Image: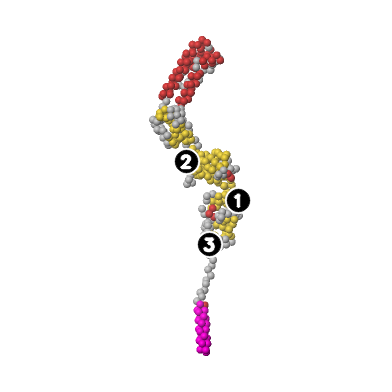
Amino acid sequence: MIRKILATLLGLALLAGAFFGAKKLIDSNVKTVREVPPSIKTVYAEPVVNTKIPIVVKANGNLVAAKKVELFAEVQGIFRNAGKPFKAGQRYEKGELLMRIDREEFYTSLLAQRSTLYDLITSMMPDLKFDYPESFGHWEDYLNNFDINENVKPLPEPISENEKYFVNGRQVVTTYYNIKNLEERLEKYEIRAPFDGILTETAIDGGTLIRSAQKLGEFVSLGQFELEVNVNQEFLGILKIGEPVVLTDLGETREWQGNVERINGRLDQTTQTVRVFISVSGKELIEGMYMEAHIAARSEENALEIPRTLLINEKELFVVEDGKLAIKEVKTVFYTNKTAVIQGLKDGTMMLTRNVPGAYSGMQVTIAESSRTLEQ
């Protein structure tokens, strides 16, 4: 019994010694932890300067020639070239002959009608001299100046009602107007350029038989174009005819000055936009060219234009206050693809001009001395 008690006490003593020995060993192995000073990030910021910001509406579309005509034949015949090849890309000046349709047969018929008129007047001259001697002189002058190869001149005005009835009874007036109709039709065998322009499409070749109402091609003006764009209805009260517009090409490397020519009177119910037509001219322009229009709509007072990437949830951004970042709420009044026009910041507020990874309100920062440029 005594032996068991001694063994138990010895075991307890060994356990106690092991516990205190381990504790001492652990305590002696504790390393001193150094305090790490908080990091201070360098940020780019600049003071806010509110100004009057013009709101520019951007819209895009393709150029269309201001003057465009589709060429159709009004008569029938064999197509003949007229000096220049009737091909797409060929340029013509106003009044220059575009094409000719063979007219020999029709012209011969016209000459026959003129000859008939001459014979009718000649045949009535004896009776005219006897019954209406006072009218004989001006009809004689008309015959003396009659040229079968030229367009017929207007008939002499009758001096009396009796002379008028006499002349009409000889079919002179009817024949005269038949000839004038043929002369008008003769001009349709030649098609001339209605303005300075270029052929953009042709549908016939030399020697082709042309039929009436057949399409021959398309002719458009040079240098004068229109751009049709869709503009949101909120700007309708601001847009005016004659308003200046800056137009740029796809790469925004070149620009042209245009003007609002027309504004459609109907609002598209699906898109809530209205069509605006902008006139522009220039030697480097060509039909179908893609362009972007910059239309000055209105101006916002006490505003600032910033990159959209600086906005947080489209209504907040970071500023620097007392060496720390803070979040300020702003009012966004207009957006473009890359920028936003905002209001709500006081002049002099230090606003971040570049985003800071991991930024949060209260972060300690220092402002870099060398950067004063808004990020793009």
Is residue 191 in view from this perspective? no
Is residue 146 or residue 21 the one in the foreground?
Answer: 21
Q: Are marks 2 and 1 in contact (CB under 8 Å)?
A: no
Residue linked to disc 2: 288
Judge whether 126 appears above or below 307 on screen: above
Asked if residue 87 lies left or right of residue 309, the reply is left
Is residue 333 in view from this perspective? yes
Judge whether 88 appears above or below 331 on screen: above
Q: Say whether disc 1 or disc 3 marks the residue closer to the N-terminus.
A: 3
Residue at image position (42%, 22%) is 108
Of all residues, the one furthest to the bottom in this rendering is 2
> Tag 2: residue type?
Gly
Is residue 61 or residue 251 the one in the foreground?
Answer: 61
Q: Answer with the quarter of the image where residue 200 lies.
A: top left
271 inside magenta stretch: no
> Tag 3: residue type?
Lys
- Identify the mark at residue 302; answer none if there is no mark: 1
Of all residues, the one furthest to the front in this rendering is 1
- Identify the mark at residue 41; answer none if there is no mark: 3
> Tag 1: residue type?
Asn
Place of residue 51 in the rendered image (x, y in percent of width and height, measured from the top left): 59, 50
> From mark 2 to mark 1, how far is it between C-alphas?
40 Å
From which residue to which does the magenta span run?
1-26
Place of residue 320 in the rendered image (x, y in percent of width and height, measured from the top left): 57, 59
Place of residue 151 in the rendered image (x, y in percent of width and height, measured from the top left): 47, 22
Q: Say whether disc 2 or disc 1 marks the residue closer to the N-terminus.
A: 2
Is residue 78 or residue 211 the one in the foreground?
Answer: 211
How many labels, in total? 3
Is residue 43 or residue 176 the one in the foreground?
Answer: 176
